[in-house]
Amino acid sequence: MRMSQKIRMGFTLIELLVVIAIIAVLIALLLPAVQQAREAARRSQCKNNLKQLGLAMHNYVDVHNGLPIAGVASTAGGAYVGRDSWGYFHRILPYLEQTAVYNSLIRTFVPTEQRM
């Protein structure tokens, strides 16, 4: 009678392996869904960045009555002197809520007599 009343404690190795296999299958099924969600988030962020650039361009146009120039080749007496290194992206920084970066660039690269 003692043998039939034996109390079993813990799991067998087979039961443990079956549980691990079930968890692995569930993870394998969920992985593509997680990757799709990440890709959708990346796509959404990219669209938002492009929208912000477009809005910054529109705000620049409203203030300056024209699109920002890409750069200016300067000449002095017909001789090529150099190229204005300020492109459109530098010019729209204040409209992208990056005024501190814009001011830092102005202080660093633009001579005092040319600042607006």
Image (cartoon, rainbow, N blue to C red):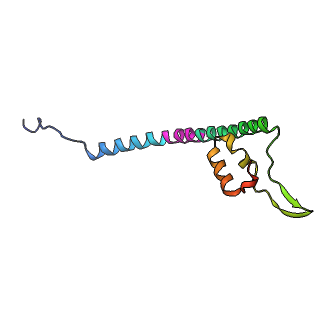
In this view, the residue farthest toward the left is: 1
Query: Looking at this view, is 51 or 30 the one in front?
Result: 51
Find the magenta span and give its range: 30-39
Overall secondary structure of the magenta section: helix
State whether residue 41 is above or below residue 101.
Answer: above
Q: Residue at x 72, y 44 (%)?
A: 92
Examine the structure image and report whether residue 37 is included in the region drawn in magenta: yes
Residue 62: % across, % down: 78, 34
Residue 49: % across, % down: 66, 41
Asked if residue 66 lies left or right of residue 30, the reply is right
Q: Residue at x 66, y 57 (%)?
A: 108
Examine the structure image and report whether residue 79 is included in the region drawn in magenta: no
Q: Residue at x 60, y 42 (%)?
A: 42
Which image quadrant: the N terminus? top left
In this view, the residue farthest toward the right is: 78
Asked if residue 98 lies left or right of residue 116, the reply is left
Query: Looking at this view, is 34 or 48 the one in front?
Result: 48
Query: Looking at this view, is 12 or 56 the one in front?
Result: 56
Looking at the rendering, which quadrant does residue 38 occupy? top right
Residue 113: % across, % down: 75, 54
Q: Residue at x 69, y 37 (%)?
A: 51
Number of labelled discs? 0
Looking at the rendering, which quadrant does residue 73 occupy? bottom right
In this view, the residue farthest toward the front is: 113
State whether residue 70 is above or below residue 65.
Answer: below
Asked if residue 82 lies left or right of residue 79, the reply is left
Residue 86: % across, % down: 75, 53
